[in-house]
Image (spheres, helix red, strand yellow):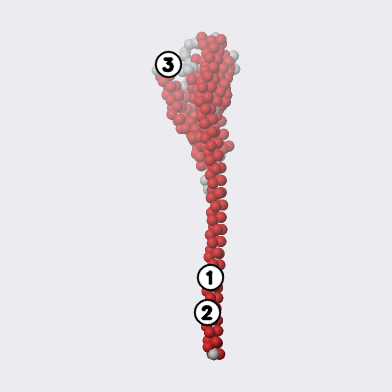
Amino acid sequence: MAQKVSVIFERKIATNGWIIKTRWFYMVGVLIIGILTKTISQSNVGFPFIAMVFLFLAYALINLMLYFAHKSVEKNFSKKLLYLISYTQIIVELAFFTIIMHSAGGIESISTVFFFLPVVSASLIFGSRGSIITAVAAGLLINLLILAEYYGVISHIDRYNVPTLEFQSLPIALTKTITTSIFFVIIGSFSGYGASMLFKREKSFEEKKRQLDEQTKQVVKRSRELAAAKQELDNKVVELRRFQQQTVGRELKMIELKNKIKKLESRHDLNNN
């Protein structure tokens, strides 16, 4: 017997699957962008090709694991596994884009644009709250990364062969990252609002579907009761017909017996005369 699945759960399965499939394309795009920056713009000097390929393969391996886990969800409809996939996708993307940003030059890198991807993905999976939380997390990550590089907690990787004012001046660096963080939250709010409106309609549809299912159950129950009543009535009709046949048969026999009695009486009278 097939397991009954809600419309909301089906949408979450489809959304996670779509994000996993889409990731195969944009992860290739991120790798191409990294290669082009080294070959054309002569930047990313501290980000070796081998490191780019290694990150790409690691990301591909994790996405492949998510793909097979999602196939298991489609087969078994496991809510726990689906939620694990949902959270893992967002966390992995934030972690990988932070590593890429650091490797590509930190504040000097254009990799901050990649963080819009998990923000939008979170809005599709979790709605407005999830997208805003992801946007805030992305903003904290890039600002913490800049502070850690500036104060020497982790070493800064030069994007160019010469030091830049963006890295040397913390106010300039934070102005850039804070501005970007604000835009993360704005995008998260807009995409989250759109997703939340869709989710509200989805919940309304789910409620109407639930009511329709309940009404259908009542109709089926009533139909079964009517069928049982009809069967009982048919049985009584059959019994009445049998009773009628038996009664009519007895009456015919009684009439036949009366006729015989009359004939015998008639013969008896004739014999006496």
> What secondary structure is marked by label 3?
loop
Which badge, 1 or 3, is on the more N-terminal residue? 3
Q: Residues within 10 Å of mark 2 (few under 14, many from 20)?
A: few
Residue 167's x, y, as percent? 53, 12
Residue 33 in sight here: yes
Q: Give the residue type that dot 2 points to.
A: Asn
Q: Residue at x 50, y 10 (%)?
A: 164
Mark 1 and mark 2: span between their CA atoms? 16 Å
Q: Residue at x 53, y 65 (%)?
A: 241
Q: Residue at x 54, y 67 (%)?
A: 244
Q: How many marks?
A: 3
Which badge, 2 or 3, is on the more N-terminal residue? 3
Indicate whether 247 appears above or below 18. Answer: below
Task: Find residue 42 and name its label.
Answer: 3
Classify the position of the C terminus by image quarter.
bottom right
Residue 212's x, y, as percent? 53, 40
